[in-house]
Amino acid sequence: MMETVVTTYCGICEKTCGMQVTVKDNAVQKVEGFKEHLRSRGDLCVKGRAAKDILYAPDRLKTPLKKVDGKWIAVSWDEALGIISRKLAAVKAQYGANSLAVYHGQTYLKNCVAMFSMKRFLSRYGTANLCSAASECFIPQLLSGITTFGSLPMADVKNSRCVIIWGANPFASGSLEGCNTRSMRLLKELKEKGVRFIVVDPRTPDVAQLADIHLQPRPGTDGALALGMMRVLVDENLYDRDYVEKHTAGFDRLKEMLRDYDLEKIEKITMVPRSAIEQAARLFAAVKPASIMNGNGLEHHTNTVQTIRALSILLSITGNIDVLGGNTFLSPIFLSMEDAEDIPAPAGSPIGMEEHPMFVSMINQAQALVVIEKMLATDESPIKAMIVAGGAPIPELANTGRVKEAFQKLEFMAVIDQFLTETAEYADVVLPAAFFLERDEIATMPLNLQNRAVDGGQCWPDWKIWWELGKRMGYEKHFPWSGFAEAADLLLQSAGYSYEELKKHPEGIMEKAVPGKFLENGFYTFSGKIELYSQSLASNGYDPLPVYREPMESIVSTPGVAREYPLTMTTGARQPMYLHSQHRNIPSLNKLLPAPWLEINPQTARECGIYDGDTAIVESPRGSISMKARVTEGILPEVVHLPHGWRHADCNLLTDHAQRDPISGFPGLKSSLCRVRKA
């Protein structure tokens, strides 16, 4: 058989970079970047280049499994779906539909047909308790954008003259133009053209090599740092007075609040010298247009929404919102499908509505950490069954030990995945999901078609799993499609496209936003302006201004705990060869970083009796783990960093799920306390 080339996009992470796959005899020969793709332009990250290795990994799940007396037994799809459908029917009959919770992973957001199919199944079943990795990722940025602008702005870095990279490392995460390779090249090209960079991170990430100014705040104090920069702008009349008067609401109240944040106080809170704060503020005000690219380094704190709000306001008072080269608004494509017959909305609210109503209302999902909390709160857990679809709540959710306790209380658990993960080991049934090279799908940023390159055999696409499970449950009429193309076509019609049209655009289709639209027509807020004083936050009982609140566990807020655990612990900086907890089983990727390292400053290491390469014990009020220490000047004294996603050195055994940001419910994964000693 002759070789063929299939154009598709990489489904490993959410960036959906274009890919061309050479296939012969139903086997992938090689993968390459697709140069015509609108976003990635031929670049692939190290994970994308290893797609063939992941596809043919010897420990890939190849058949459904059921657990019998603690051992895994291979079964047919018919038997596996029969077990799941019977158990879900029994749980619903005995406890009600909301006793089922479903947790999905991050990449489900880009798998449009799979996401639609899962939500349709859950609507028909009747449970409101869908939750996801969004309980610890991205939603604070969305909440901040909605409460300030009515929409979400993103950094237009390519057209900026000054860029703040705040709590992000696009060299590792690819948070700009698809993969990290392209992001790295773009930023270096901008640097060569004279763009000024400010990097804010308590560590020294790779991207800090671009920095004209590198600020290293104590973890969790970024909101105070942003307020300090605002104070400089106001005191020195460096803000954009005309822009503020025309397009913002609440500036006088903001000025009044800033009186409480003199730079002496900010320096004490953040540990950033006053002179550096002044220098950064003056540069950001002087060089326009300017943008701020922030990552999840700002999300994993118990003050996250107000911190990101502070950054939004810093952009606003310098006139850098909805302008070319500032932070501009996307025009995302939304897909939906009308039902011939209405499916009643699930009874009751998703778990977390009482604790974090804005989070739950905005994305219509349960807060996963509250789900865990509720499961543990009483002898009788409100959740009796769970399906995990393409996600890893172990080890990704805070306080792994408590997550494991919660899972042990379930009557039934099913997992859909490509590997037998640590989460899957708690399941009763595991279903083998197709890898992206074995399935058809759709993504929306850009609107893009994922074409199946090879046959997945017994590994099914997620959308097919939900369809067939739905039919087993008696929901046949809600899954009537003959195949992927028919369902995709119906979804695409809601955005004015068709499946056949999308096939003609392998490069993808991108709806481009035009800066200035909101400045001209008004913002989607109560006032129609940028709300420095947020009426939506005020109406929900939260601070309408970005008041700084100390992390709930820190050397300042919990001095008693700090006496025993004096170091600030930050976790989870991304590594380009891994996606969260994935791919450590892939030799070509694992050899690039075969083991985790504790990062510790030389001063702190001396105080702890630690030398470079020593095995260190890291302890928190929740537990302890051990790993090798790397002594480096690239992290602040009294601060340590632990990587995430390692099964045998799980940093989330140390983090807390109970102390959460009041608005989003996010935990302090990057700003809690620990102590370190030599093993």
Image: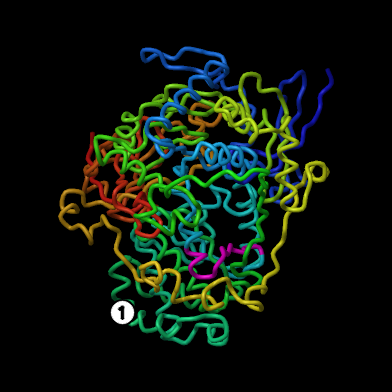
Q: Position of residue 509 (x, y in %)?
A: 75, 51
Task: Pick the residue in front: 634 or 157.
Answer: 157
Disc 1: which residue: 260
User: The C terminus lies in which quarter of the figure?
Assistant: top left
Taking the image as drawn, is residue 54 in sight? no
Report helix, strand or loop for mark 1.
loop
What colour scheme does the image use?
rainbow
Q: Quadrant of residue 384?
A: top left
- Please provide percent x and percent y for residue 554: 26, 57
- Inspect this view and state whether residue 214 appears: yes
Mark 1: few/some/many CA within 10 Å (<14, 14-19, 20+): few
> Can you say whether 344 is above or below 187 in the image?
above
Residue 589 location, x and y as percent?
Answer: 54, 31
Give the camera-side residue of 112 and 291. Answer: 112
Judge left or right: residue 180 versus residue 6: left
The range drawn in magenta is: 144-158
> In this image, 327 relative to 380: left or right?
right
On screen, residue 540 above or below 334 = below
Residue 151 included in the magenta stretch of the image = yes
Q: Nearer the viewer, residue 308 or 664?
A: 664
* 235 sits left or right of 338 in the view: left
How many numbered marks have been drawn onto this rendered protein structure?
A: 1
Viewer-nearest residue: 473 or 3: 473
Does 452 lie within the magenta span?
A: no
Where does residue 511 sit, x and y in percent of width and height?
A: 72, 58
Residue name at image x 65 percent, y 49 percent: 182
Amino acid tagged 1:
Asp
Q: Residue at 65% of width from left, 38% of height from top? A: 10
> In which quadrant will I find the N terminus?
top right
